Each structure stands twice: as C-alpha cells, then as structure tokens.
Amino acid sequence: MTSLFAVSDHLPSGRVPIEALAGELGLTPMQVRIFRRYHGLGEVSRDEGGSLLDLLRGAVAGLAALRGREHLVRYVLHARSFPTVVPYPHDPVRELCAELGLDAGVPVFSVGHHACASGLLAIDAAGRLLAADGGPGALALVLAGEKAFTPEAAAVPGSSFFGEGAGACLVSASGGRDRVLSYAVDLRGEFDTVADCAESESEFQRIYGEALAAVVRAAVERAGLSLERVTAVLPHNVNRVAWHQVCRVLGYPRERVVLDHVPTVGHVFCADHFLNHRTARQRGLLRPGEPYVMAAAGAGRGATFAAMVLQH
Amino acid sequence: MSIRTLLPPALSTPPAAPPGAPSSGWGVRRAARLVFPEPSALAADPVHAARLHRYLSDLLAPYGLAPAEPDATGQSYGEMAEALIGAVVPAGEQVDLLVLAHSVPDLTPGRATACRLGHVCPGGPLSFAVTDQGGTAASTALRLLAAYADSAGLRRALLLVVEQDRLPYDPGVPVALPAASRGVALLFGDPLPGERPLRIDPAAATATAAATAARSGTDPWWELAGLVADR
Amino acid sequence: MTSCDQLVSTICELLPVVLKREVSGADAGTALLDALGLNSTTGLELVLELEERLGLEISVEDLGRDDFATVGSLAAYVADHLLADA
C-alpha cells in the first residue's frame, strides 16, 4: 500500500500584495479588486532572487525522516504544474540529490502534465514504482514547488495567483501511515488547446465546480467511505470561492477545507497539499486512523481534476 | 464518464515479480516510428512565437542566458504524438494508459501535452508525461507503464517516446541533441489471437537506454520498434 | 431600503459600463450570461460597480452562477445580501 512516510513544506519569507503584481501582469484595478473580494487572494509568497533549487532544498530540509535513510531512496520525482521550468539540460533536482548524498544511479525525473494535480499523480506513480521493484524499506522522494518565473506562471486570469514555495514527501510501498486509500483522476483534454480560446475557457469555468466535486466524490466512494467521515480536505489553493462552490455541490462543511493559505501565500503550484497537510495537523483536523482528502484541479492549459483519499 | 479511479498496489504484490509478468504474453503488440523532418507549422505562428519568446526569456534570465531569435523551427510533441497514435492504435481499439516521454523540451513548453493526448487517443486513457531525466526518461516511463499495467490493471498501454533535434537557446553547458526529430510508439497489451507480443524487461531496457542516452534519446526505442515490425 | 425594482434599473444602467458596448431594452427578464454574454469576470465587475453606484456593500460569499441567470435573479441576490445601508 502506498503511504506518505513523511511530509514537509517550505515557504520563503517574502510576501507581495497582488496589487504590486498587477502592472506587470496587465491586470486592471477592477480585476485586482475582484481577486481580493471574491477570490479571497491578497498576498503571495515570493523568494526574490532565490532559485528553484533553494525552494526544493528548503522543503527537503524539513524532512527529518530522510536523514539516515538516504540510501533507501530509489526514485526522485518532481511534480510540476508547468512542464518546463528550467533550461534543459540544467537539472536543479539532480543537483539537490547530489547535495543530499543520494545514490547517483537513482532515477531523477519530472512527472506531470496534470497541471496542479501533478503532485497527486507523483505520489500514486511513486507508490507503484516501489511496489514493482523497490524492495523492502525502499522510499521515493516526491518534490513539488516552482518559481513564478514568467507571467503565465505568476497568475491565472480570473482565477488565481501563484505563490513560490515547495513541498516534499517520502513515499513508501510498505503500508504504514499516511496510507493512500484511493485516487481518482479526470483528464479533460478537450479544454487544452494550443491557442487561447475564449469559449473553451468559459466552458471550463462553467464545469469547474461540478467536475472537482465529482472527482472528490469518486475518490471517496472508491475508498468505500462516505463524505461525512472525511475529516478534512486539503485543496489546491487556487482561490476561496471555487472551493466554497465545491462544498455547496458536495454538501461538505467549508470549515474543513484548509483554505488558510489562500489570502497570505497564494497557489503554490503542486505543493499546496504539503503545506495544507501541516496546517491541517496543526488545526487538529487530521486524526489517527481517520480519512482525509487531497484534491486539485488544473487551471490554465491542462485541465485535470484529481482527488486522493488518505488515512492519517 | 471520464473519471478513472484507482486503488494503490496491494501489500501482497511481491516486489520481486517482473512487472507485467502475471498475465503471460503481455508485451509490445504493435509499434510505429516516424521521423519529423519538417518543423511544426506552429513554429511559424507569430502569436505562438511571441508567447514562447517571453516564456523562454524569463526561463533563461536567471541563468544569464537568452533565447535565440525565433526562426520558425521546432517540434510540437503534441503533433508528433498524435501522428504516432494514429499510426499505431488499430481501428476500433481502445487504450487505457498513455505515457509520453521526452527530455528535450517541447516547442510548447507550458503545455500539458499528455492531458491533450488523453483526449485524442481512443479509449480516453489515463495519460501523463515523464520528462527531464537527461535522455533516459523513456526507460522510467516504461517502468511506470509496466507498474500501472500490473497494479492498476491498465493493460492496454501506449508508450510514446519523442525527442526533437532543436533547442531554441544555447544552454551554456554541453548538451546532446538528436540528429533528427523522431518519435516511437509502442503499444502494449495482452495478445489477441494469433499475436505474439514482444516481451521487454524494463531493467534491461534501462541499462540499454542509459548506455545510449548520450547519443540520442530515441535510439534504443527506434530499434525496438523495428524489431516489433519484423515479427 | 433599496427595492428590487431600483436594483433592476441600476443593473441595467451599468450593463453598458461593464460590457463596454450599447445595451438596449434590458429588463428584469434579460438573460445576462446567455443573451448578453456576461462572463464570470464581467459579472463580478457588475456586482462591484453596483456597490460603488449604490454606496452599499454586497456579500459575495454565496454568489453563484445561477444568480447571474437574469437581471432579476441578480437583483434578488443583491437585495438578500446587502451588508450595510448607506
């Protein structure tokens, strides 16, 4: 059984109000007001002058469980919202692995094309690789986090602002906690068009809430559970209103969706689940033996809805 | 209904069993390989070129680098993969899993191409990409494909290996690019009557791929596709 | 106390502002999303413009797509979700 052996996250200390980013992103003052009032965004985290390596290194630094277990890591996966984040063949993930003293022969790769749901894909994929050939005690290191390096990676018009940060987890195939119970994914490739298309974009907005609710429900049902038993939902921090809509559709209490970081950090690409995991633990929303959900949707180019049920 | 639900691998799956082994006969049923000598039409699109130039400029700036002037060259892996899907998936058949592998970046570096391919490939497969492994992404993609076939029952699986011969910037460090833009498609599955799929051991494929990665990402797969065609 | 009729007419006045074009013959039954092509961004602009015009604050927490079906449905939402009187 796939499980998360340890989870960590890293947020840089810098915060930038969304008003300050409006100019370079071509947003009008009215659009910024809407982001604040309606979407619940306010400040986003930024690591000015810092690199992707800095962010990922920060997340792994919090993985105390990795120390002494470096030799057990068989795979390293970087989950990305944006498929290309560094100039090929530069590879900061590989550099980080060398710093950590991981075996040089360990496959280090990026997995994705599920936009901000790629972190869930990475956990699922890592678990299957380990189950196939990992050996007892083998682990996979899953990393997430990116730089808001270009306007496309800084905001999604009418939807969200990206925050810089990172998350890391150690995946095991030997059971234990937090155990993955199910994974549901809905790839909506019909919304992915090479050219920007207004009708496609507005249709995507229209189905968003229902599609995200449906995939959460599907994952919970596949795990043989009912929604009332789910103690918390760790969302992607796209914005507040999308998740309020999902809660209305599901009949799930919005207080149990960890949206704490939306106004102060923004949407940290594929890493939101890791920082929301920490917050959920701190708020007492994760109880041993009880199920919770991680869920995300892909915004922008790459429409994916995914949810994973785990047992704490 | 487009939602796929999966359960994680059971603890009882013995890790020593070769992926895909339980159902004997599972292997490569069909293969296709294509060269793409002409650049993608998208490369000449001025709107796309401007968007790409901004993306690349911002990508390269932290490294003190800049993109080359747009010159209407480059391949879209989405287009290459669609051509390969058309060539390898027999009419009327469905695919459960699609894994796209490449190392050289796409002409559309911000695009979730595999998500799109899940829509165009018959069967609406679970699709994703494996990239950035210095030329050996395809061998990890193969391991993943076998692992999903085994533990998630996604046995009609398509591996797409694509690499283009063009990098629109000088990365400031040595980089090996293939001599031509090529793509290979390997369709895995249980044999239909009369078929004798080619079995591949992912571990052996990894070793071969690593040895040849310096030359070209698609070489060992190109040769494999030739072997399948000859059977 | 702002009446629904007043809201309807104020909304109709603001339509050209957010849609940036002439809008004629709009009334309570006008379909905002379908007929006029309002989208989620211009819809929200409309609500915020309404706040400024009225000098009132509107709670947008529960605002959903259905509330933008017609001018009348939007007016009904606003009437139910005013936070403070000027």
Image (cartoon, coloured by chain):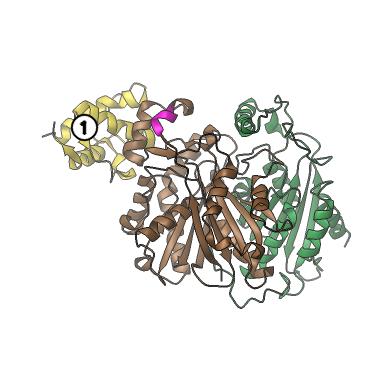
Chain colours: A brown, B green, C yellow
Q: Residue furthest front?
A: A68
Q: Residue at x 54, y 45 (%)?
A: A55
- Say if residue A41 shows up in the picture: yes
- Say if residue B155 shows up in the picture: no
Which region shows up in magenta?
A: A17-22
Q: Amino acid at mark 1?
A: Val
Q: How many other residues sit within 10 Å of disc 1, few (<14), some (14-19) or many (≥20)? A: many
Where's residue B209, x and y in %?
80, 55
Q: Indicate the chain on which mark 1 is placed.
A: C
**Horizontal side, residue B39 vs residue A99: left or right:** right
Where's residue A214, x and y in %?
43, 58
Mark 1, residue position: C8
Frontmost residue, A306 versus B37: A306
Magenta stretch contains residue C30 = no
Magenta stretch contains residue A19 = yes
Q: Residue furthest right?
A: B230
Q: Residue at x 68, y 61 (%)?
A: B145
Frontmost residue, B97 versus A190: B97
Frontmost residue, A187 versus A71: A71
| Figure quadrant of residue A129 | bottom right
Where's residue B24, x and y in %?
75, 75
**Horizontal side, residue B37 vs residue A312: left or right:** right
Q: Is residue A132 above or below residue A95?
A: below
Q: Residue at x 39, y 55 (%)?
A: A279
Q: What is the chief secondary structure element of the magenta stretch?
A: helix
Q: Secondary structure at mark 1?
A: helix
Q: Residue furthest top?
A: C22
| Figure quadrant of residue C8 | top left
- In the picture, the quarter occupied by the C terminus of chain B is bottom right
Where's residue B213, x and y in %?
81, 50
